[in-house]
Structures are given as structure tokens and as C-alpha cells.
Amino acid sequence: MSDSPAGTSLYNSDTIIALATPSGIGAIGVIRLSGPDAISLVNEVFGGKDLSIQHSHTIHFGTIKDGKQVLDEVLVSIFIGPRSYTRENVVEISTHGSAFIIENIIKLLIRKGARPANPGEFTLRAFLNGQLDLSQAEAVADLIASNSQASHQVAMQQMRGGFSSELQHLRDQLIHFASMIELELDFGEEDVEFANRDDLKGLIYQIQRILHRLIQSFEQGNVMKNGVPVVIAGKPNVGKSTLLNALLNEERAIVSEIAGTTRDTVEDHMIIGGINFRFIDTAGIRDTEDIIEAKGVERTHAKIKEAKLIIYLVDPEQDVEEIVEQMKYIESLGIPFLTVVNKEDLLTAEFEQEVSGIRYQGSGGGDPDNRQQTADNILLISARNKTGIEELKSEILRKVNLHSINTDDVLVSNIRHLEALQKTEESLNRVLQNIDQPITSDFLASDIKQALYYLGEITGQVTTDDLLETIFSKFCIGK
Ligand code: GDP
């Protein structure tokens, strides 16, 4: 086991302290302590009632004193373990939000014996003490980072444990079969079969269906959590920046940095219909004059490929043949796209007629919805005069098709979970391949064990210290 930065192991039962609210000046700051001595430590510096004899889930007004000096008037909330977030004794001190006060109270309590918490250590303790399983603990981080109705919904759903209980149930059934097959192994050469192969197959098919659904849900879960990547493409001067501004003006999102994501390009976020959209800067496309030329530009190309939607913007000054060419190229990418004519105010009857002529030419590029799109009306907007923007937004929502999500659906939004699910699926595929072969039960048993291992990795029944460190180090201190 590697040591954490503070030189302590993952499995500690000392008393930790950290600021739970953002650092900086706020109306109030909340300092949180967790551990066996949380209440007695605070009691030592608290001017007010004797905290050691108070009931759990009570709040007490008083002062925090360093010797004779009063540092602040505070409210102290007491949670007696196991009825707390970490299942340990937890104290929350609400102070006035001055960085000076907070720093001095924390320093004082450290002098009294508390230890500064490592990133995510409160949640780590909640996990280690069985309050949360691993996927729920990860959902806490997602919930804190959530910046839209959709990302909130995915995190909330995962935190409530819907995801884990489904997996737990599958795992239990598999464990039963694994133990039956283990039993067969005990009988060695004798030709006994405790685990009915047809029943096992039936169970695996059932599990595969659920795995498949969960794996498929990642695409949706991921965009709901991290935002739907949308590329606005088109020639220079067709009005891409103006359109972006028109969209942003009304719905600028509160953007928070999501731990673990790196972004190498500037992106504008906005919430449309409760969903976070990431409008990706297509500077690369602009630089290379147009999207056709951009074909060779790998980076831009990669950006386009990761988009869930391409808004292909044109203007009435453009040659219609060229538009058709570019639409064919975009279509060939197989990504849903919207062709939008900007500068509606400059529209000529001639252009309109020509454009209407291209409506039925699309092959769909493999995406039936693209066929639909070319068969639909091409949208007309004016980015500058802000006409057609609402229609465009509805069309964007319709295209990404996230609205059909049932709030009870279990969505996978974590890449670690996705990988574990895929590995589970692979192991089970091997079981299915081998089940009818004249092979010994130990092969079956080992593949089933592998599947169990990967499923356990998601919920945390199977963990390594490295995995825990990786997950919890992404949390902020105080979580
Ligand atoms: P980009 O190069 O594609 O980002 O294009 P810009 O957003 O910079 O716009 C290029 C020019 O088109 C600017 O002068 C805009 O004011 C103008 N423009 C944008 N939208 C409209 C519109 O709806 N109607 C008209 N007439 N001009 C527009």
C-alpha cells in the first residue's frame, strides 16, 4: 500500500478535519471533523454547552476559543456514529466565512490533535465503513460537480444505489453458480454436474442482456454527465461566432471543472432543456477555410468525430453545389447533423428554391435520422437578429434525443464502470463459448470468477489500494 501525501494509510481511524465549504470569503464556512475524538476535540475549545453529553443530530450555539481569545461565534452540529456520513462521530462547525477565522479554528483543532484530511477522505471513510458502495461514493463526486439537470439526475440516480443493487443481484446469482462448479472440481475425476449447464446459460444470457443495456447506456450517461459535444462547422463568415453568442446570451451555463476531465480546446457550455451542451470551438475548421479542407487536419477531424451533433452553418451567399458537397462529407461521418441557413434576412427566393431542391438528396450516412434531417426542412435562422433560435434549440434537443430518458433508467456515466462491465461481458462470453465444449470445469470456474471480480470492482467488493487512491484523490479536500 502506498502512503498518502500526509504519510498516513488509507485505513485510518484518527480524527480528521477540513473545510467543507469552498475556500475564500463566504457568508459562512463549514469546518467538518470526523473520527472518534471529533466531539471531544471540539468540546475542548467550545464555549457553551458540554458537547460530550448532547444527543446526535443536534445543533448548539457557542464560541470557539483559543485560550482566552474568542475566534468566532459558531453553530456546532453533532452527529454521533454510526448515524453520520462517515459512520464515525462527525462535528460540523458553522463559522463566519472569513478565511482568517476558518484558518485559525482549523489550526487550533489540529494543535488539539486533529489531522488535516486528505482529498476525499470523508467519503473514503463512508465507503470503508459501509455507508456507501464504491459507485455511490463516486456519484458523490459527480453530484458535487453536476452543473445541469441531466448531470444531476445521473449522479443522483447512481448515488441512490440503483446501479449497484442491479449489479449486486447479478453477482449473487453468479456466485451461486461459481460455488456449484467449484464443488464439481472437488469431485475431481468423477463425472458429476452440480451446476446445470442450461440454467447457467440462461443466467448468463440474462446477465448479458443487462450488461449490454448498461454498456449501451454509457454513451447517453456520459453526455448527460459531461455535456453533449456539438461542433458548429461552416465556412468563415457564415456567422458561427454570432450564432454561438446568440445561443450563449440567453443560457450561459455555470461551468464547473469536472475532476478527471482534460480539455485541450476552449469550449462554451450552455444548458438547453436541462441538458449541458458543449459547443466546441472549431477554430481549426475556420483556419483551414472550410470543412472539406479540414478533412486532412487530423485534430479538427478528431474533434468533429467526437461530436454528438454537427451544426453545419451556411449562408445565402454560398454556392449551393458547394453546400451539397459539404453536406455529403458530413453525412459520410455518420454523425447526426443539422444544416442551418443563417442570415435569413439576406435570403433570396432563388437561394431558397435551390436549397429546397437539396432536401431529398441525402443518403443518411448510415444514420436514419440524417435521412430524416435532409428530408426535413433545412432550418432558417438569423443569428444576428436572433430569429429562429428557439426552433434551432428544439431541433438540437430533438436531434440528440436525450429527452426520452426515463428518470428511473440506470445509466452508466463512469469510464471505470464501463471498462469493468466490458470485461465482465468478455469473461461471460468465454464461459458461453466453453460451456458446451468438453473442457474441465476449472476453465468455466476461472472465467466466472473473472466476471465476478470485474463486477465487484464496480461496487467495491473487490478493491485495491491503488484503485481507491486513484478514485478518492480526485475529490477535493473536505469531501
Ligand atoms: P464566423 O466567421 O462564421 O464565425 O462568422 P461571424 O459570426 O464572425 O459573422 C460574420 C459576419 O456575418 C459578421 O459581420 C456578422 O455580423 C454577420 N452576420 C451574422 N449573422 C448574421 C445574420 O443573421 N444576418 C446578417 N445579415 N449578417 C449576419
Image (cartoon, rainbow, N blue to C red):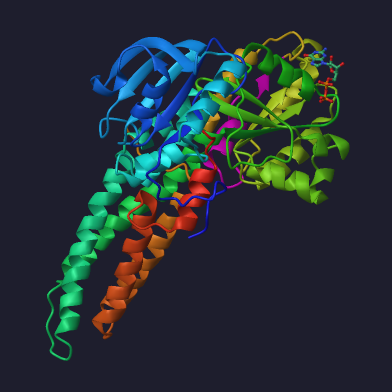
| Residue at 53 percent of width and 41 percent of height | 368
| Residue at 40 percent of width and 50 percent of height | 11
Query: Residue 125, position in %: x, y?
Result: 38, 42
Camera-nearest residue between 81 and 398 = 81
Query: Residue 320, position in %: x, y?
Result: 80, 30
In the rendered view, does 1 fall on the left or right side of 409?
right
For this orientation, the residue located farthest to the bottom is 189
Check if residue 141 falls in the magenta segment.
Answer: no
Can residue 268 be seen here? The reply is yes
Q: Which residues are magenta?
A: 364-381
Q: Quadrant of residue 35?
A: top left
Q: Quadrant of residue 183?
A: bottom left
Query: Residue 328, position in %: x, y?
Result: 71, 42
Camera-nearest residue between 115 and 18 = 115
**43 over 190 or under it: above or below:** above
Q: How many marks?
A: 0
| Residue at 52 percent of width and 58 percent of height | 2
Query: Residue 363, position in %: x, y?
Result: 61, 43
Check if residue 370 falls in the magenta segment.
Answer: yes
**231 over 93 or under it: above or below:** below
Q: Quadrant of residue 276?
A: top right
Can residue 405 be seen here? The reply is no
State ligand 1's quadrant.
top right
Camera-nearest residue between 297 and 107 = 107
**357 over 13 or under it: above or below:** above
For this orientation, the residue located farthest to the front is 68
